[in-house]
């Protein structure tokens, strides 16, 4: 049944997002052509046209991300929190399957949006073949030999997991907001920011405490001395991945429990 839910969610999402995916690369190509035509021109009007086209392309990238995020929230909210929820919760599926279907659809859509934006920027700068080496050189300059192939893979995985956790945080906030009888959207927004404040406070406090805890600092010094720079970097990213995964699991199961036992539909 999860497969059928995913199929339905993908179809509903694709009807809206696919035109955006088609438009952004076309705008990137058009911007590239206009920029090349305006390179050797000194007229004010020509330069203004080039700047305007670049501005429109930048707006299209922002619009693609905003459209994806808004669509992701609306799909979860409308399907599970409004009158549609009465139908969804009568299906022979468990609440965790509903949440997982929405999560996987949102995650894939966000990843594809990122890839489309990346390809579009590559087209703008003269093609992916020229853009990828520039990105690689930029990474090498930024990390100065600290990162290797495994490090890049872990960084990509970290970004994907961070996106998934951010989506789950939105779902959790919407679910908590609907525990109230009135002003549910307002409470959802407030709880979203409250969760961020709590997490940032815990993170900053932990860093301050651990940085002043001598045994921990000594342990880090010994660990870094016995490992190469890329190995220590990979270990650091691995720990961050584990912490994010735990946080995401907590978000997922709290959201599922609210939907299963305490949901107050409109």
Image (cartoon, rainbow, N blue to C red):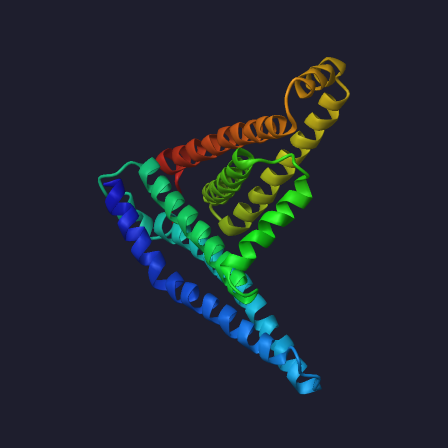
From this view, report whether residue 236 is shown above or below residue 119: above
* Closer to the camera in the image, 71 or 50: 50
Residue at left 57%, top 64%? 125
Q: At x 66% / y 31%, what residue is drawn? A: 203
Taking the image as shown, residue 76 lies to the left or right of residue 141, namely left
Tell me: 35 left or right of 104: right
* In the displayed structure image, the side of residue 90 where residue 205 appears, left or right: right
| Residue at x 43% of width, y 65% of height | 20
What residue is at 52 percent from the left and 33 percent from the top? Answer: 150
Q: Quadrant of the N terminus?
A: top left
Q: Which one is nearer the viewer's eye here, 27 or 181?
A: 27
In the picture shown, does residue 77 fall above or below 24? above
Q: Quick one: which residue is furthest to the top in this view? A: 215
Which x, y percent locates residue 155? 55, 38
Image location of residue 6, percent across then percent down: 30, 47
State whether residue 90 appears in this view.
no
| x and y percentages locating residue 62 in the rendered image | 55, 62
Taking the image as shown, residue 10 lies to the left or right of residue 212, namely left
């Amino acid at each position: 049944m999860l497969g059928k839910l995913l199929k339905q969610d993908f179809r509903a999402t694709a009807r809206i997002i696919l035109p955006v995916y088609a438009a952004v690369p076309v705008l990137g190509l058009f911007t590239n052509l206009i920029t090349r035509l305006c390179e050797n021109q000194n007229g004010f009007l020509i330069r203004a046209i080039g700047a305007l086209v670049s501005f429109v392309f930048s707006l299209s990238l922002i619009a693609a991300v905003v459209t994806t995020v808004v669509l992701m929230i609306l799909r979860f909210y409308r399907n599970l929190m409004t009158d549609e929820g009465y139908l969804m919760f009568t299906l022979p599926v468990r609440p965790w399957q509903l949440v997982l279907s929405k999560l996987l659809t949102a995650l894939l859509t966000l990843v594809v949006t990122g890839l489309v934006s990346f390809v579009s920027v590559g087209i703008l700068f003269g093609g992916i073949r020229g853009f990828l080496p520039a990105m690689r050189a930029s990474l090498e300059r930024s990390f100065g030999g600290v990162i290797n192939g495994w490090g890049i893979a872990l960084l990509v995985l970290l970004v994907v997991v961070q996106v998934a956790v951010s989506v789950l945080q939105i779902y959790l906030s919407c679910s908590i907001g609907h525990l109230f009888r009135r002003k549910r959207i307002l409470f959802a927004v407030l709880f979203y920011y409250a969760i961020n404040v709590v997490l940032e406070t815990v993170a900053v406090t932990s860093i301050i405490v651990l940085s002043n805890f001598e045994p921990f600092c000594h342990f880090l010094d010994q660990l870094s001395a016995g490992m190469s720079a890329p190995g220590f970097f990979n270990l650091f990213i691995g720990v961050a991945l584990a912490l994010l995964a735990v946080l995401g699991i907590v978000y997922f199961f709290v959201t599922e429990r609210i939907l299963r036992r305490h949901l107050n539909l409109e």
